[in-house]
Every structure is written in C-alpha cells, then in structure tokens.
Amino acid sequence: MRPSIGRTVGLTLLAVVLASAQTIRPAFSAFEVATIKPVGPDDLRAGRYIRMQGGHRVGVKSYTVNGLIAAAYDLNPCAISGDSGWSGSDLYDIVAKTPSDQRPTYDEQMVMLKKLLTDRFNLAIHREEREFSIYELTVAKGGPKTKTSTAPFLAGRYDFDLEWTPDNSQFGGQLPSGAPDSDKPGFSLLFRNNSVSE
C-alpha cells in the first residue's frame, strides 16, 4: 500500500509543478524572428495597420519608420524630430513571430517593436521638453453657448461641431477623400513635454 501512496503523491506534485510553469508569462522582450520588406506608395491603397495575425504573429502593413516609432512610443508623429528624410517617407511591411505560445498584449507587442527598431534600424532616441502650439477650449465672454445634448440618459453632455483639415497622423494615415484641399485649419493633438528625437 505504501508504494502506491508514494506514487500518487509524486504524480500530484508533478501536476502542480507543471500547472505553475504554464502560468508563468514570458518577458516578450524581442520578436523571435522578423522579416522587413520595403514597399511602394501604391500599397497604401491596401490599408495600413499594426495587428496580431493569429496568436503568434504580428503583421505591420505600409508603415514608415517614423510611424513605427510613433506607435511603439505612443507619440503623435509631429512630436518626432531629427529624422533623415527616408524615415518619414519609405514604407515597410513587417511580419514578426512572437517568442511564446501565449498571445502578447498590445503593450508587449510595442516592447518587441521598440527592440526591432533598435536592432534593425539602429534607432537611438532621447526625450526632450519642447513647446508646441495647441488648441485650447475656453469659455467665451457671456458664458458658454453650447446646446445640451439630445441623446437620452446623458446629463451634462453637449453637442458641438468641429471642422478641421486632417493630416496623416489621424485616421490611421488614410485621409478622407478631398481632405488635402480643405480650407479648414489643421487640428493635431500634441503631447506636451513628450518629444522624441532620433
């Protein structure tokens, strides 16, 4: 009887150890392998994206290096300076395999993208404080002239119209038809004190 009990305990402990090992999350510090391919401007018609393709592969379509930097560091492209010309114009497709059977989160994908930029494009960055022009909403003389929202169940909400000329930092880089000819002012949400130089 005792040998049988010993084997049962040993198997139970082994099962607990295996279960614990499966719950440990990998570091996701770098892609296992990545292929980078230059593409032509006509490929923009197929769209631009950074997304998971299945559980273990990240696909990047028609991105400039500056666009990749903006995505990896959560920046507006207007906050990137010191580019070499080509980094803001040449487009790339990337297919990268993640290093684990577990699906990486978006933040983990961006960590691996930062490493890829450093290793394959020799990116070196530093942050500096910089002043940008921004739009500021203020209350006009005589008080606000906003109209209360007509949407049901919304208290303290207001409707207003905002018109501007979009740029390539908005709408995933896919500008609406006719946007470049618009006579409306530009509108870009910039991050204060959050600039990156190559």
Image: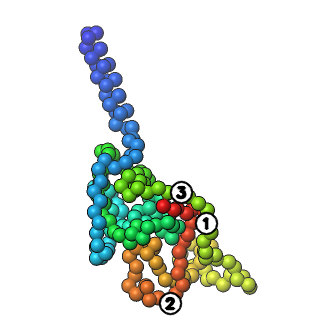
- Above or below 157: residue 142: below
Identity of the amino acid at label 3? His
Q: Nearer the viewer, residue 186 or 18?
A: 186
Which is more toward the observer, 25 or 109?
109
Residue 133 appears anywhere in the view: yes
User: Residue 177's quadrant in the figure?
Assistant: bottom left
Q: Residue furthest right?
A: 142
Residue extending furthest toward the top: 2
User: Mark 1: which secondary structure?
Assistant: loop
On the rendered image, what quadrant is the N terminus found in? Answer: top left
Q: Identify the element where label 3 is drawn.
A: strand
> Label 2 sits on what residue type?
Asp
- The local secondary structure at tag 2 comes to loop
Q: Which residue is mark 2?
A: 183
**Quick one: label 2, few (<14), some, or many (20+) residues within 10 Å?**
few
Give the residue at mark 1: 130
Residue 7 place in picture, x, y as percent:
27, 17
Residue located 53% across and 75% down the image: 188
Residue 105 visible in the picture:
no
Q: Quadrant of residue 134?
A: bottom right
> Cβ–Cβ below 8 Å for labels 2 and 1?
no
82, 29: nearer the viewer: 82
Q: Which residue is mark 3?
A: 126
Say whether residue 185 is left or right of residue 102: right
How many angstroms separate mark 1 from mark 3 (CA)?
12 Å
Crowding at label 3, few (<14), some or many (≥20) Cα neighbours within 10 Å?
Answer: few
Foreground label between 3 and 2: 3
Q: Is residue 131 left or right of residue 82?
A: right
What kind of residue is marked 1?
Answer: Arg
Displayed quadrant of residue 174: bottom left
